[in-house]
Every structure is written in C-alpha cells, then in structure tokens.
Amino acid sequence: MNEAEKLFTKGVEAIKNGNMVSALVYFEKATQLDNNATNRSYLAFCIARERGQFKKAISLCEEALKEEPENPVHYLNLGRVYILTGQKTEAMRLLREGLTHEENREIVAELIGLGMRKPPFIPLLKRQNPLNKYLGIVLARLGLR
C-alpha cells in the first residue's frame, strides 16, 4: 500500500468517525500524491462540508463522475454535497442513480436519513393533491400504509 492509499484509508475512517477536519487534510494530501477520481470525490465532499465551497465541490465531483461513471462513491459524495446545499431532490436523484450501479450501504443510509417517501397513494394525482395528501396521512396513522 503506497502513501496515497494510506492517506485515503485514514480519510475514510476520519469521515466515519465524524472528524471532517482530519479527513479534509488526509484527502488533500492523498490528492496531491495521486490525483485520481476517488480521492477528488472525497476531497470535494470535505471541501463542501468544512469550507462551504459548494461550486468547487460540485465541479470536482462531476469531474470524478465523468471519469468513472460506474463508481457509486462519486454519486454518494455528489449527493452529500447537494444535501449540504439544500438541494434534497437532486441529492436523492443522484443517490438513487448510484444504487443502480452497486448496492452501497452508505448510499442507503443517506437515503434513509433524507426520509425516503412512499409513492403517492393515487399515482394519477400529484403528491400535493389534497386527496393524496390526506389519504396518505390517514392510512399511515391507521398503520395501513
């Protein structure tokens, strides 16, 4: 395992432990040593989280996605950045797209954290339609939905 891989592993562990400042440092160093798509993707999430540089983070994640469109980690990190920007709908779309490439526990956890919604009770009507809204509420309280 080379130095960049060691730094990457430490960065992922730091994220899991909630130590984002350390993760940012690890991913910055790892990216300097090996500027690969995965390092840039995680670096982008850390930059967005710790520095609030959302445009730069989105740009880095999109670059990573162009290089490796089959890697669900890039969808995860871009989805996380969109969550930080408050764009929940776009984040959910990206996270779901990431799941089509591979079953990823972290993506599933993010989707659960966002509160995956059930489809509208009457699919022909919009979600905001009062009939759909109140039928869904009543049936959920009765435990039938």
Image (cartoon, grey):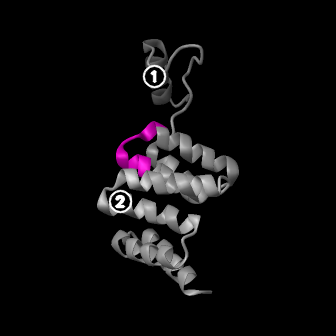
- Nearer the observer, 143 or 8: 8
- Nearer the observer, 63 or 48: 63
Quadrant assignment, res 28: bottom left
Where's residue 24, x and y in %? 39, 71
- Nearer the observer, 58 or 87: 58
**Amino acid type, callout 1:** Val
Where's residue 43, x and y in %? 45, 66
Where's residue 120, x and y in %? 54, 23
**Disc 2: CA contacts within 10 A as few (<14), some (14-19) or many (>=20):** some
Report the magenta stretch's main SS: helix
Marks 2 and 1: which is nearer the front? 2
Tell me the SS state at disc 2.
Answer: helix
Q: Which residues are magenta?
A: 81-89
Please give the label number shown on residue 138.
1
Point out the tag, 2 or 1, that comes first from the N-terminus.
Answer: 2
Q: Residue at x 54, y 55 (%)?
A: 63
Where's residue 141, x and y in %? 45, 29
Q: Is residue 73 above or below residue 97?
A: below
Q: Residue at x 42, y 56 (%)?
A: 57
**Residue at mark 2:** 49
Q: Residue at x 57, y 64 (%)?
A: 37
Q: CA separation, marks 2 and 1?
A: 38 Å
State whether residue 109 appears in this view: no
**Tag count:** 2
**Amino acid type, callout 2:** Arg
Which quarter of the figure is the C terminus placed in? top right
**Disc 1: CA contacts within 10 A as few (<14), some (14-19) or many (>=20):** few
Tell me the SS state at disc 1.
Answer: helix
Q: Residue at x 56, y 52 (%)?
A: 75
